[in-house]
Amino acid sequence: MSAKAERLHLRVDAEQKALLEAASAATGESVSTFVLTAATEAAADILADRRVFVLDQQAWQVFDEALSRPAGDVAGLRELLAGPTVLDRAPAHDGT
């Protein structure tokens, strides 16, 4: 892990602060360490739900078969991807 140079500032009410202080004291950590650890673990769990999924044997078989099929042509997709995008257009000189 790299040196910590970034900061986050949080506003909490008195009840939230007391809860965080009590929980950090119970774990023997500073409030900062407790909050950072809890928030980092929560963030990792949330992102894992979007990257990892579990399938039963039947669902896996259906999924695997779909991945094994050759890719099909989607009408108009080649033309769409080959043409210019809004990023390719020259900027307007009239202020719009």
Image (cartoon, rainbow, N blue to C red):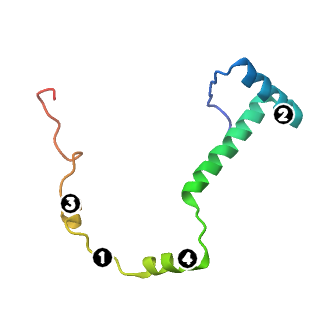
- Contact between marks 1 and 2 (CB within 8 A): the answer is no
Q: Does residue 26 sit above or below 78 in this rendering?
A: above
Rendered location of residue 94, percent (x, y) = 11, 27
Residue shown at 64% from the left, 49% from the top: 44
Label 4 and label 2: CA atoms lie apart by 43 Å
Mark 1: few, some, or many residues within 10 Å (few <14, many ≥20)? few
Q: Secondary structure at mark 1?
A: loop
Q: CA distance from mark 3 to mark 2?
A: 55 Å
Q: Residues within 10 Å of mark 3 (few under 14, many from 20)?
A: few
Please name the residue that numbered disc 3 is placed on: 80
Q: Amino acid at mark 4?
A: Trp
First along the sequence among labels 1 and 2: 2
Q: Which mark is residue 72?
A: 1
Q: Which residue is mark 4?
A: 60
Residue placed under numbered mark 2 in the picture: 29
Q: Is residue 21 left or right of residue 13?
A: right
Q: Are marks 3 and 1 in contact (CB under 8 Å)?
A: no
Number of numbered discs: 4
Q: Residue 54 vs residue 75: left or right?
A: right
Separation of disc 3 and disc 4 at Cα?
32 Å
Q: Nearer the viewer, mark 3 or mark 1?
A: 1
